[in-house]
Image (cartoon, rainbow, N blue to C red):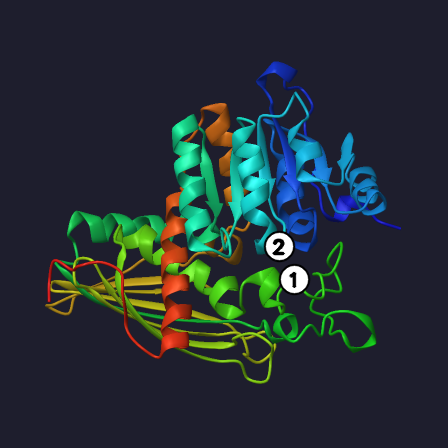
């Protein structure tokens, strides 16, 4: 039997209803039931009133297990609920555009999972739609809320590193089960055994559903963080992928030139050994070098004279604050916080993803914009 105490902390119920942000979750699958729904249930200013899954039986089970009033089978049914203020889009990428558009058209604030969409133009259209309607639009990238990310952004944009010249980003984790769809039945590992439910079998390994493999699933994190830290757009992209026997890409090597001329090298893959993961980022400026290991919560700033500042290590929950985007959605709509992860960052990440895929197809460098430095 499902024990919601394993997922939810005790929540005080003393908030007057008019002070609550009424939310719905579209795509109440693995990630939503593990993070978005518990975050909304525990937030003192959130009231989760609706969830959506594709069948009435599955939607009803999630609604019953998490004490949610409305169980819906379509995004249109959910966004039609009059009381709603905001929604989380946590479905598969092929559904993001239509569902987010339906919510924005309805006048709802939106947190959308990464990757924002499969097609770049759809991401750009959603950003413009939200802007035209004056709605809060967030992309779910937890690293944008980590203390080290915020401090790194401040250091870079304040000029503490001097002129930024080169960035090296290495991101690895264990996703091969997802890309090969070995996540259900007797062959499944124990990776998802403690989850409320497992990921869908085709959610990550069918290009028509996921867009691609690691480049959509995880480079969306890296490219979004790159935009968050630097405030820059990609100007040129050259990429190579390796599928490693999976239907989608598993290994990615991507070279990026930003609009200000900064050179960026991104190496990512989803085939690490079990329990192994790396997120090393080196940022080289003319005056200093900044090193961050995001998974381990380490950050060090080293100046030309050799002097080094070591920042306090962050514990796991702070180095990757998984529920921060959901909490931020509520806080932003309630008027208690600024948007910490604007969807514009997700659209910039989609530019890198789309250009990388084009580069692989054409075996050529893809030029997106002119640079201010050669």
The quarter holding residue 233 reads bottom left
* Whether residue 341 can be seen here: no
Judge whether 143 appears above or below 290 on screen: above
Q: Which residue is drawn at 46% across and 48% down?
A: 122
Q: Which of 205 and 345 is in front in this view?
A: 205
Badges 2 and 1: C-beta atoms under 8 Å apart? yes
Q: What residue sits right under mark 2 in the picture? A: 92
Q: What SS does tag 2 mark?
A: loop
Q: Pick the quarter of the image with the C terminus.
A: bottom left
* Whether residue 317 can be seen here: yes
Q: How many labels does the image show?
A: 2
Q: What SS does tag 1 mark?
A: loop
Image coordinates of residue 94 in percent, x first then y, are 59, 54
Image coordinates of residue 87 in percent, x first then y, are 59, 35
How many C-alpha atoms fall within 10 Å of the one at disc 2: few (<14), some, or many (≥20)? many
Q: Which residue is drawn at 51% across and 57% down?
A: 118
In the rendered image, the residue lying farthest to the front is 362
Judge whether 287 appears above or below 360 on screen: above
Query: Gap between marks 2 and 1, in whole Å?
Result: 6 Å
In the rendered image, the residue lying farthest to the right is 1
Q: Residue 203 carries which label?
A: 1
- Pick whichever of labels 2 and 1 is earlier in the sequence: 2
How many C-alpha atoms fall within 10 Å of the one at disc 1: few (<14), some, or many (≥20)? many
Image coordinates of residue 13 in percent, x first then y, are 69, 23
Q: Which residue is drawn at 62% across and 69% down?
A: 205
- Horizontal arrangement in the rendering, residue 371 relative to residue 227 (left or right): left
Image coordinates of residue 248 in percent, x first then y, are 56, 74
């Amino acid at each position: 039997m499902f024990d919601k105490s394993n997922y939810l902390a005790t929540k005080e119920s003393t908030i007057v209803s008019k002070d609550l942000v009424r939310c719905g979750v579209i795509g109440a699958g693995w990630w939503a039931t593990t993070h978005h729904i518990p975050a909304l249930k525990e937030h003192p200013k959130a009231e989760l009133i609706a969830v959506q899954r594709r069948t009435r039986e599955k939607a009803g089970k999630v609604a019953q297990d998490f004490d949610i009033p409305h169980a819906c089978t379509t995004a249109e049914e959910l966004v039609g609920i009059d009381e709603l203020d905001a929604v989380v889009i946590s479905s598969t990428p092929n559904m993001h555009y239509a569902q987010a558009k339906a919510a924005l058209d309805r006048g709802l604030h939106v947190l959308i999972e990464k990757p924002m969409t499969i097609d770049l133009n759809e991401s750009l259209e959603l950003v413009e739609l939200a802007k035209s309607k004056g709605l809060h639009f967030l992309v779910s990238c937890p690293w944008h809320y980590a203390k080290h990310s915020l401090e790194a952004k401040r250091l870079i944009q304040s000029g503490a590193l001097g002129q930024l010249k080169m960035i090296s980003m290495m991101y690895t984790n264990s996703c091969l089960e997802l890309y090969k769809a070995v996540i259900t039945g007797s062959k499944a590992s124990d990776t998802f055994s403690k989850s409320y439910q497992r990921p869908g079998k085709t959610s990550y390994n069918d290009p028509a559903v996921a867009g691609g493999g690691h480049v959509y699933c995880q480079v969306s994190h890296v490219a979004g963080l790159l935009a968050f830290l630097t405030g820059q757009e990609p100007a040129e992209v050259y990429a190579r992928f390796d599928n490693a026997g999976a239907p989608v890409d598993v290994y990615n090597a991507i070279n990026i030139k930003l609009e200000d001329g900064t050179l960026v090298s991104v190496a990512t893959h989803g085939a690490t050994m079990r329990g192994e993961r790396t997120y090393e980022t080196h940022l080289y400026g003319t005056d200093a070098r900044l090193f961050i290991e995001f998974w381990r919560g380490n950050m060090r700033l080293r100046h030309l004279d050799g002097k080094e500042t070591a920042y306090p290590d962050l514990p796991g929950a702070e180095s990757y604050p998984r529920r921060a985007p959901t909490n931020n959605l509520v806080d932003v709509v309630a008027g208690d916080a600024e948007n910490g992860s604007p969807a514009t960052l997700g659209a910039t990440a989609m530019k890198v993803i789309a250009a990388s895929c084009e580069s692989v197809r054409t075996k050529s460098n893809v030029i997106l914009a002119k640079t201010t430095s050669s």
